[in-house]
């Protein structure tokens, strides 16, 4: 009697809980016990064969001490290099790693994370049916943490996943994660979309992640995040964890729009080529919103506009606030960068812009970052302040590759050799050389001439992250 009473109460509670009006007729919550017992099995059977395991192998060289007693600091202090105490010999060690990948082309095209295959000497792909193939790295893109592999299935057509629309996802939607956590092949976990447009994850330069509570663990990287139609809406890339050991219900996936654009670019060129907009900006803060009379901080305020670039030709001006790109809202500058990065070269960006309180619509045709002026990469030598530094003319293509602000161009330090004069004087990669001995320099050739022009000393003015610094050498 008591059990029957509990069942009656449970049925009433379920009826109350699930009798909630639904705004979207296509998005339904379970309305009965029968619907609650429905399975994801048909979805998994269709999608899982396209998710693969990736095993990598690389040989690293480490130095090992000849005398194990040298690890004792007391003995090292008194004996130094005597009796072989300080000597070490190179040893080769094999490092192995595992991850996941997704077949996105029937001919054997596979997308995974860059960090899964970075530095690998050998890459092996294992399919769901346990067939193994050696894989070739087509190209990788560290900025988005994506890489493309290719295997040769001979004449056989492989199962593959079609790209879905990550922009159609809403918080609360069901998703499945499929991958190879801890080497446990073909593991499926379910969850919901916990948040969208996460931009402060710190995993990649173009972060705009889907957050999910589907369990993602080490080895899941590069695996599939699929929607309830079995479409690929994301590549699982990272987890939030206090110790890095396992999932605590916060995982991040790269949206399918970015995956599709980057993978196509890599397949066409061997590396990712991103569209160039020709303007930079900052997120609208509360203070800026108040000064402009906005209800709340929203959008990206444009700073510098590169002369002759796509943004300039579209009519964009410094001080404009971009609110949307191709009808997709832009909440901050990271969202603006993401939206522009998912538009292929030659594509159009329709911008919704707020200018002096009035809304305007501008259209920019994005292009490949120009290689003008020529980089003219040069290594400085001799007894001069920049000796040991590698410098180049900063053009749009180099700025895009290196993540440096384009600004007005000029000469930038690319590398500084350890122990060199430039290193000892404090020059760093990314420094922009503004002037030498109070004379402006805007080309590599001008810097080289200025270094040779004087014998009395040098004063080198640089711009480092917007801060003007001077290096004086007698």
Image: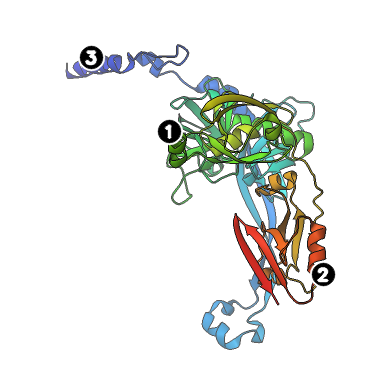
Q: Upstream in the sequence, badge 1 or badge 3?
A: 3
Q: Upstream in the sequence, badge 1 or badge 2?
A: 1
Viewport quadrant of the N terminus: top left
Q: Quadrant of residue 229?
A: top right
Position of residue 188 measured from the top left corner of the image (x, y, whole percent): 51, 32
Label number found at residue 296: 1
Q: Quadrant of residue 280?
A: top right
Q: For mark 3, what is the residue?
A: 8
Mark 1 or 3, closer to the camera: 1
Q: SS for tag 2? A: helix
In the displayed structure, 430 sits above or below 157; it is below
In the displayed structure, 15 sits above or below 404; it is above
Q: Foreground residue, 36 or 457?
A: 457
Q: For mark 2, what is the residue?
A: 452
Q: SS for tag 3? A: helix
Q: Are circles 2 and 3 on residues that touch, CB within 8 Å?
A: no
Position of residue 347 measured from the top left corner of the image (x, y, whole percent): 71, 27
Q: Foreground residue, 163 or 298?
A: 298
Mark 2 residue crowding within 10 angstroms, few (<14) / some (14–19) / many (20+): few
In the displayed structure, 449 sits above or below 367; it is below
């Amino acid at each position: 009697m008591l059990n029957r009473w509990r069942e009656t109460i449970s049925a009433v509670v379920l009826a109350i809980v699930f009798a909630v009006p639904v705004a979207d007729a296509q998005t339904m919550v379970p309305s009965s016990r029968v619907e609650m017992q429905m399975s994801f099995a048909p979805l998994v059977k269709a999608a899982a064969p396209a998710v693969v395991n990736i095993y990598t192998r690389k040989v690293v060289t480490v130095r090992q001490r000849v005398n194990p007693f040298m690890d004792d600091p007391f003995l090292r202090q008194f004996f130094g290099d005597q009796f072989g105490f300080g000597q070490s010999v190179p040893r080769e060690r094999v490092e192995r790693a595992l991850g996941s990948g997704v077949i996105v082309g029937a001919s054997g095209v596979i997308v995974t994370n860059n960090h899964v295959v970075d530095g690998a000497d050998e890459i092996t792909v294992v399919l769901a049916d346990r067939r193994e193939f050696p894989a070739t790295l087509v190209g990788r893109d560290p900025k988005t943490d994506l890489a493309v592999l290719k295997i040769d299935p001979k004449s056989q057509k492989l199962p593959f996943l079609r790209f879905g629309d990550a922009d159609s996802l809403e918080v609360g939607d069901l998703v499945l994660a499929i991958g190879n956590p801890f080497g446990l092949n073909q593991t499926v976990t379910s969850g919901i979309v916990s948040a969208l447009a996460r931009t402060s994850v710190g995993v990649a330069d173009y972060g705009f992640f889907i957050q999910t509570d589907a369990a993602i663990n080490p080895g899941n990287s590069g695996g599939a995040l699929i929607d309830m139609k079995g479409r690929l809406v994301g590549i699982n890339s990272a987890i939030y964890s206090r110790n890095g050991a396992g999932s605590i219900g916060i995982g991040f996936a790269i949206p399918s729009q970015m995956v599709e654009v980057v993978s196509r670019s890599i397949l066409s060129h061997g590396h990712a080529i991103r569209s160039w907009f020709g303007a930079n900006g900052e997120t609208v803060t509360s203070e800026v919103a108040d000064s402009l009379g906005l209800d709340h901080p929203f959008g990206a305020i444009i700073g510098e506009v590169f002369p002759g670039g796509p943004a300039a030709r579209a009519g964009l001006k410094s001080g404009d606030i971009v609110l949307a790109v191709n009808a997709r809202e832009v909440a901050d500058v990271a969202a603006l960068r993401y939206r522009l990065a998912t538009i292929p070269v030659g594509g159009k960006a329709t911008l919704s812009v707020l200018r002096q309180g009035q809304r305007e619509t501008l259209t920019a045709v994005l292009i490949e970052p120009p290689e003008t002026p020529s980089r003219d990469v040069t290594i400085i030598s001799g007894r001069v302040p920049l000796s040991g530094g590698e410098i180049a003319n900063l053009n749009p293509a180099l700025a895009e590759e290196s993540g440096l602000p384009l600004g007005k161009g000029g000469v930038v330090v690319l590398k500084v050799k350890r122990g060199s004069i430039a290193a000892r004087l404090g020059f760093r990669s990314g420094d922009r050389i503004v002037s030498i001995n109070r004379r402006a320099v805007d080309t590599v050739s001008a810097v080289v001439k200025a270094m040779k022009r004087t014998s009395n000393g040098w004063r080198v003015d640089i711009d480092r992250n917007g801060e003007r610094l001077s290096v004086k050498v007698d």
